[in-house]
Amino acid sequence: MIRVMRVGLFVTCLVDLVRPRIGFAALELLEAAGCEVIVPPSQTCCGQPGWNSGDRPAARVLAEKVIAEFEAFDYVVAPSGSCAGMIKVHYPQLFGGEGAWLARAEALAARTHELTDFLLNVAPLERVPGRFAGTVAYHDSCAGLRELGVKHQPRALLARVQDLALREMKDSEVCCGFGGTFSIKFGEISAAMAQAKCERIRASGADAVVLGDLGCMLNIEGRLRRTGDEHTRVLHVAEVLAGEK
Amino acid sequence: MQLASVHFRQRASGALADAHLQRTLERFGSGFADKRAAARQAYGEGAFEELRDACAVIRDRALADLDAWLLRFEEEATRRGASVLWAEDAAEACARVLEICARHGLRKAIKSKSMLSEEASLNEALAAAGVQPVETDLGEYILQLAGEPPSHIIAPAIHKDLGQVAELFVKHHGRPKSDDIAQMTREAREMLRPHFLSADLGISGGNFLVAETGSVAIVTNEGNGRMVTTLPRVHIAITGIEKVIPTLEDLSTLNRILPRSATGQEIENYFSILTGPKRAGDTDGPEQLYVVLVDNGRTRLVGSVLQEMLRCIRCGACMNHCPVYQTVGGHSYGWVYPGPMGSVLTPVFQGLENALDLPQAATLCGACHVACPVKIPLPELLRSLREMQTQRGLRPWSERAAFRAWAFAAARPRLYALATQFAARALKWMGGRRGRIARLPLAGRGWTEGRDFPAPEGKTFRELYRGGQRHKT
């Protein structure tokens, strides 16, 4: 008998606070892929803000919490390359040199996936429920792309969405300027980088830019709207794959 | 070079407001990055990745026994007639050079590009001692006329456009204005030629020091390096101690990746391996060859969490791929080394407290790490520097307090739930009917100066899930 995969959904703190619908879209997709999905209710944040800001103790407390909350599952899936990258790449660094915690961190890292990577490679989502009438350009978020190798996974899944046409924009791999607290500490530079991204998006002529990280979404959407673009949609890949209803 | 890294924020702001510079940066754009990508593809992507691994190993091997390889270099170079001098810091480096000038009565120095000479403010020291320094790399020559520091380590005048250079030439050359690049280059060459022929000292940097032969390897594209190192009667190569590599075979491997990573070239136009001064019977070459090996903060990196930074071969790929560098330009960084590598080196060489913004002024996007020919984990090193800042109390109290509060709440799910439920509602209310916030309070102002903040949906995922919701609505 094939045992159903038990997946712990790490919603991420930004989805929890700002866009719960992305979390539910991820949940639907994982269930559509045949997984049993559990959302540990005590989850908060992966600790990346602390890690990236040089506050190792804070990052550590939260990393221990995430490990304890999720290590019982077969897999951990996050609708974010950034948070999945934190668990997969940076937790082992965070516990470097500490036997017991390091082993637990590495064990969890090995079973942690970004959503589209999981839906393509681990629990294949053959029939994608979403339908999207229009062209979309995919923006490669940095951590997913360079830490986890998320590049073709979202595109392969989007290609299965009914009526959706995928169009590449120039410089899709160039950072949008979000960078976590960078976007606040260096708002002016960050906004200028977002502007460059928005120009590429518009030049692609796509109806929507689709991406896999909420931080980049807020950044790009915020800049588009501020500069008067009311029509280019900014969507999380989970929303598009799950369909809008 | 005068340190101005504490002013990063203001300088970056100025760079963003400088329409001329922005146009120049845009034109520069991904030029070098595209060329590197093409060179990588031509080499074979898999093979290129193997080459990166091999080069990182070579550099690590040299750094693991840095002292031993340096002594070997000194021994071999000395045996071949060169003089190896040591300098602990910038002042000593200048002193060594000036001592040589005094010993041989030298009055005019022609220079090929050397970032270490910028580090040590060598031109100022030479001029003060009555030795005329003349930069002969075209970019450096332009900047010497303009009285500006370089903004890129391999394309120092990348921030200047054709029109600006044309005007500089009119002002300094006193000839009719031309904006034909070939003509302008010819003009610069004609101006430099008498200096080449009359100088008694040539000063170069060194891309690599080969320990087994005591050689200095220099790569250039303009040929000026050859003239600088062969025409004058004295040649001084001044370089950082980390440049040493064990063997000629290593040099051959590293020089496969250096030009491809820098400019996308398979090989530079000029690749020189200089071993000892002119020997009896040689038709050219300097009578005296000095190698000045400078520490200037490098040994602080040895054995530290930042040691990997010493692998750097100064190709510029990190800045060519850095979206922040391409947005604010090299001068914003306020010292010799801009971009990601500069954001690590400046705080180390000049003091953490003198370059507080640099480790923070990065999105940690990782483009530099992926492009680096010797695989320096630049984002990790920037993170380590941020940690050092925190540990040494060099972050603003408001930021520290905010992080403490966040970490406290995030470790307590009930408290966190309350806080986020409140925030989700408050922000949704602030977003109004349009669903976006034009002005956030406190630290959030940094966000909304240039962007709206898309308002939250109003309830948190966790509260909806707890209430039984399982699907999008």
Image: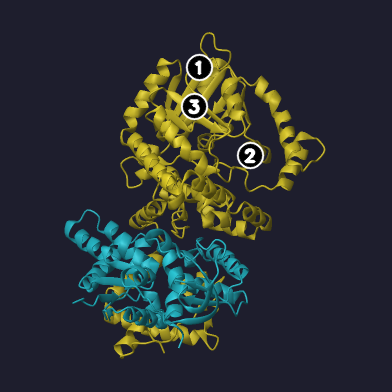
Chain colours: A cyan, B yellow
Q: Which residue is mark 1?
A: B277
Q: Is residue A116 visible?
A: yes
Q: Residue at x 54, y 44 (%)?
A: B264
Answer with left or right where residue B457 lies relative to residue B121.
Answer: left
- Give the residue drawn at x 33%, y 30%: B67
**Sequence order check: which comes first, mark 2 or mark 3?**
3
Name of the residue lying farthest toward the right? B176
Q: CA distance from mark 2 to mark 3?
A: 26 Å
Q: Which residue is mark 2?
A: B139
Farthest top residue in view: B280
Q: Quadrant of residue B57?
A: top left
Image height check: is B436 above or below B225? below
Amino acid beneath label 1 = Pro
Q: Secondary structure at mark 3?
A: helix
Chain identifier of the residue bearing label 1 in the image: B
Near-viewer residue (A26 or A167): A167
Visible in this render: residue B440?
Answer: no
Spatial CA distance of label 1 from label 2 is: 28 Å
Q: Is residue B420 above or below residue B188?
A: below
- Image x and y of residue B351, in percent: 42, 46
Residue under numbered circle 3: B95
The amino acid type, in three-letter code, at marker 2 is Gly
Whether discs 1 and 2 lie on one chain: the answer is yes
* Amino acid type assigned to the residue bearing label 3 in the image: Ala
Quadrant location of the N terminus of chain A? bottom left
Which badge, 1 or 2, comes first in the chain's sequence? 2
Q: Position of residue B54 (x, y in %)?
A: 37, 40
